[in-house]
Image (cartoon, grey):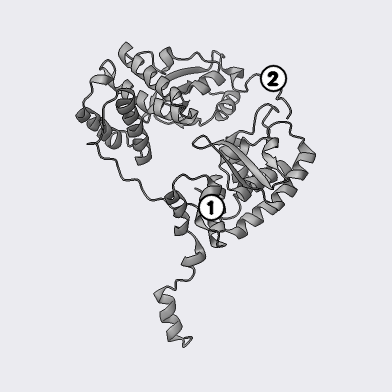
Amino acid sequence: MDTPRTPQPNRYAMTAHNPDIRPKPGTHRGGAVLFIAFDFDRQHNAWVKKLPQARWSRSKRCWYVPDTPALRKELNLPMAASGTTNADLSPANQAALKNMIDHMVLKGFSANTVRTYRNEFLQLLLTLKNKPVDELPAKRLKDYLVYCLTKLKLSESTIHSRLNALKFYYEQVRGREKFLWEIPRPKRPLQLPKVISEEKILLALLNIRNMKHKALLFTAYSAGLRISEVVSLKVSDIDSDRMQIRVEGAKGKKDRLVTLARATLQVLREYVREYRPRYYLFEGQTDSAHYHPRSAQAVFHQVFENLGLPKNISFHSLRHSFATHLLEQGTDIKYIQELLGHNDIRTTLRYTHVSRKELGKIESPIDKILRTARGDI
């Protein structure tokens, strides 16, 4: 296996210390953010749009990004006191946040889970100001969550994440048994997977001229990979002898093996001959960094934008389509669960709601009435 080269200076730090750019920590829409303000400049505007999850705030009249340690490091900004994003926290609440983070690290939580729980818990601490979080009764927590739903207008999904973070702190860090049992959870909306037809996927993939883009989308769809999984693949993860792809450290810190399609192997061989990737299969700006998920998302939209698909279709729709098409071909749901890496079969069973296999057999009453009226019985 080739050893990655020394990483190049990060691409976001170029103007991070420019006096015209003034990153400032704060909160927005219930989350910890870095506000990035500057007098209008086309170069600065193009730069900030490349930052992960950069958004424009109409109310603040400036750009903002999630305030995370990873992004602060990318921007060469100092870490906030005690690992928080707000130095105004009381010493007791700073200690509480640190204890929570240390507990998650010791339990081996993934970096994404640590970041999510930390940020959700931090929002409560910022709201409390000098009030010690350890003295908060369940009734005050319930009032706080009502405030998050009614005033901050947070989604049910965000409320669930915030509840999970609070539950972890009070029950596992502080050892309070079933501390949040009396707080009801908002019902999650049932959202069906967004699926692209086999015909449109074939039309899109076969008309891609850029070999790197073609290899990326072929691999993602044919193996049902998440965007984070496909961009993180290494050259050594492709096993052409056993016709398998090794997915390492996927969601839930699990490794799994997925099928390597013969058509995908052929595309990958052409791609490797042209691009010569060294370590990561899909390299970013340097061969020591993998392709950025936002770049992969942009490739997807560029390829599929002219096919008449709904605007909310995303890269993840390739994974949904892979699972649905397998189900329609008669693949056992348990095998699909294994290929997707789902812990719970109920997650995989969502695809039965969008599969045409059984729905296609159901005749609408209006069709039967008209068929009968025409004498086509």
Q: Amino acid at mark 2?
A: Thr
**Residue 354 to residue 147: above or below:** below
Quadrant (top left/top right/bottom left/bottom right) for the N terminus = top right
Q: What secondary structure is found at the residue carrying circle 2?
A: loop
Q: CA distance from mark 1 to mark 2?
A: 39 Å
Give the residue at mark 1.
Answer: 336
Q: Nearer the viewer, residue 10 or 23?
A: 10
Pinpoint residue 233: horizontal percent, then vertical percent.
64, 37
Tell me, yes or no, if residue 29 can be seen here: yes
Residue 250: percent from left, percent from top: 54, 37
In depth, the one of 214 and 112 nearer the eye is: 112
Choose top left, top right, bottom left or bottom right for residue 234: top right
State the residue in front, 296 or 23.
Answer: 296
Q: Residue at x 54, y 53 (%)?
A: 335
Q: Is residue 345 above or below residue 159?
A: below
Which residue: 67% across, 20% down? Answer: 8
* Most foreground residue, 109 or 146: 109
Q: Find numbered disc 1 in the image and state the secondary structure of the residue it sits on.
A: helix
Which residue is under mark 2? 6
Residue 210, placed above or below residue 40: below
